[in-house]
Image (tube, rainbow, N blue to C red):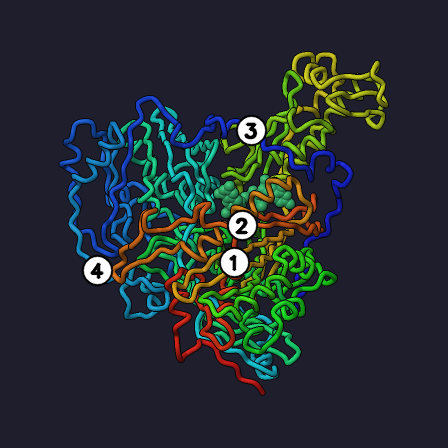
Amino acid sequence: MTGVPAPEAVVETVGHELGRWTGKSVPRKEDRRLLKGQGQFVDDAWMFRQGYVHFLRSPYGHAHILSIDTSKADAMPGVFATMTGAEMAEICEPFFRIAPDPAARIEEYPLALKARFQGDAVAVVMAETRELARDAAAMIEVEYEPLPAVVDAVEAADPRSPMLHEEVGSNLAWHGLFDYGDIDWALEHCDHVVHIDRLHFHRFSSTPLECQGALVNWDPGTDQIEILSNIQFPMFATQVMGPSLGVGQDQLLWRYQDSGGGFGNKIAMYPQIAALALISRKAGRPAKWTEYRSESMLSCGMGNERTFLDIEVPVMSDGTILGFRLRAFDDAGAYLHYEPLGAVIWSQVVPGCYRFKHVRVDYTETMTNKCPTVPNRGYSRLQHLWMVERIVDTVARELDFDPIALRKLNYVQPDEYPYETPNGCVYDSGDLPQTLDKALALIDYPKALELQARVAQDQTTKRIGIGIGSTLDSGTNNFGQARIITPDLPFSGNGEAATVKLDLYGEVYCTLGTSPTGQGHETTAAQVIADVLNMSPADVRVNTGFNKEHGAYVGFSGTYASQFAVTGINAAIGAARKLRAEIFKVAAGALQCEESDIEFEAGMASYHGDAERAIPLIGIANLVYTNNAVLAPEIVDSVSLNCRYVYRPPFSLPDPETKTGNLTLTYAAQIHACVIELDEETGEVRLLDYAAVDDCGSRINPQIIEGQVHGATAHGIGAALHEAFHYSSEGQLLNASFYDYHAATALDIPTIKTDFVESPSPFSPNGAKGMGEGGGAPLATICSAIQDALGPGATLVTDTHNPSERVWRLLRTNGERGVAVISR
Ligand code: MCN
């Protein structure tokens, strides 16, 4: 144990205030405009004199750029400007990087100076129309010298491999040893060691309905850069782009309304936005870019691909699993856009749902000639949690334990919370055995076993498999964890801002710092504000979307890491409470009584509920805004009716030496169970039954939570059975369109049965835990079911991605099983 203290137990509870609307499935406020086609998406944005931008992208996975000639494009009527990487490098600084030396030496500019992946942008054109910009880009002549590529993270670590960034001197993005407890002791003193040669988490990505896009205007008069974009984390982009472009924060004006999905991918679109800013300045026009789908598939960003090698798992004869030792190789792709943060993010959930005490992970992240890795729903923990579930499942099967009993034995137990993991993270609350039981009840486990036995006797080509998997959604990051990667980074803690204002006619108006991509922030913020102010959510206007000029924001503002339910909601609650205190102050002055005499209900402040001695919100607003000569001086000095609150979770700095500390505030859990039918002749897997049980603490809006569970589960099922990016050895992406990359559709997703457990978090003031990223469980659940269907002694399911062909091969593999047990 590291002795890392748990976050302060929450002193001030919101208890009685939150209840009338919080916890109810209030219909989503945003749906009215979205369903009527009145949402404002980035492609709807338009500015006077705007030009359309097209990026010219490298057809090679790896190549020197010997020359670029833009003259033919420049000469085309209707072309406003062109720019190349070299031109941009002359007028801006390389982007700031999270990585320490030597990867910190990477010199990345908005456009490439050398092509490092197929799709790397090497030049940009602005023209009168989108089509003309694309045609003009085709006229740019680029002389490439193709180079050998490396597309495997383990191979990339070999010094003989092709090197992407010469200035770094190797392909290493980051290496670190995470060593907790005493795994050598555990391996020596256990009764069995289960060895798994290799597990592989494949490369895929969420593919949001709306691609990336931005409209950027570098105003020559004010020297301010107005950016309308669907970026998810504008304040991170601000911190990366500002120094690169040599502009102050006051010059970067972000705006954002609706978004057709992000899933993390849209965090890392700042290189394109910086390029748009520079070409806007050159052309003296606003620059508009809407990404094509194929462009998005090639270059928007993909999730972490991770290979786990030499896994050793010490197990006692009663089934207690002591931990694991392994080597992990992560594939950062060609540039470090948010990586190598993924190298530490997984350690928020070192033991998964289990009480493992001894863990050693020798972790290496390398750069390859593939699209850069970016956060993708479940970022970095998805990979680790899948591996942990594979371990548990494999131990059960190899040592003949009941998979349910083994899980229940090793789970963190309900009475052990708050539970400190071996690396000092503190799991806040939960009841995993009950969560599992509910999932099993949904699939009617005894009946599923009967079906399995019956089908096995039927002598058909079908087999039945039953699978279980789990995921933890560790929400609300402690950004201090970045210091485990680079100790002198000036980041730690977290926070979000909100304002709640009483406006002139008595309206309640809220601004948030988040940039939602479909999570319903407008609705859930309105619910909690309505509870604090004792009114209806219908009467609370929440200005959704990000607006740096008029909204609330702090350095961490954005939508990512499943944290709105904690950071954003508690900022809104805090601001609403401040406003309520001001309303009481003004009302007490107006009604000639003490604040403690005020009752506040349905927009009316009264003296102990007396309708004759009462003042409505419009009256309070009138007194403060347009009738303030009648106010007492102490009210004039202290009341604005425009209240801002910043919620900062209670975090301290992790220790970079020992790689310990509390990295996350809340831990939502999901346990899934499924029944599959596997066809021996085709390898096809059919989901017969699927159940997802979620525990995200106190629930604000059950229907929104249900939607999140459905979405994340669909993502996981899609990735488990269909979605995978394939690269050739030259770094060519072989499936860069929806024809070849099978993004899951409604036809691929069965009815998902859901249930919930509600374990309020003692660490978040409203008891909620973020849960929007919990998409990992299907990967483990489906692998577990396939393994079950393959039967005893079968080859180990070692890959997350199991389309029919792989399953067909698994059924026919003879010899090496990929797993061995040594018993003492
Ligand atoms: N919520 C609730 N009660 C809880 C927990 C959550 O009512 N106990 C509500 C929240 O108030 C919020 C929603 O559920 O309205 C999701 O909250 P949270 O889990 O805090 O996640 P964020 O709002 O911070 O959203 C981020 C998360 C992430 S990291 C990814 S990736 C993801 C996801 O949300 N991307 C999405 N869900 C997505 N959903 C859509 N439609 N599109 C995406 O791009």
**Residue holding disc 1:** 381
Q: What type is the residue that disc 1 sits on?
A: Arg
Q: Secondary structure at mark 3?
A: strand
Query: Which secondary structure lies at badge 4?
Result: loop
Ligand 1 under 8 Å from disc 2 Cβ? yes
Most distant residue in the bottom direction: 824
Q: Nearer the viewer, mark 2 or mark 3?
A: 2
Q: CA distance from mark 2 to mark 4?
A: 38 Å
Q: Earlier in the sequence, mark 2 or mark 4?
A: 4
Q: Position of residue 518 (x, y in %)?
A: 51, 38
Which residue is rendered at x = 67% and y = 19% of the image? Answer: 506
Q: Residue furthest front?
A: 458
The answer to which of marks 3 and 1 sits earlier in the sequence is: 1
Going from N to C along the chain, the mark reached first, 1 or 2, is 1
The quadrant holding residue 602 is: top right
Mark 3 lies on residue: 543
Q: Are marks 1 and 2 in contact (CB under 8 Å)?
A: yes
Q: Report the residue marked by disc 2.
A: 773
Q: CA distance from mark 4 to mark 3?
A: 50 Å
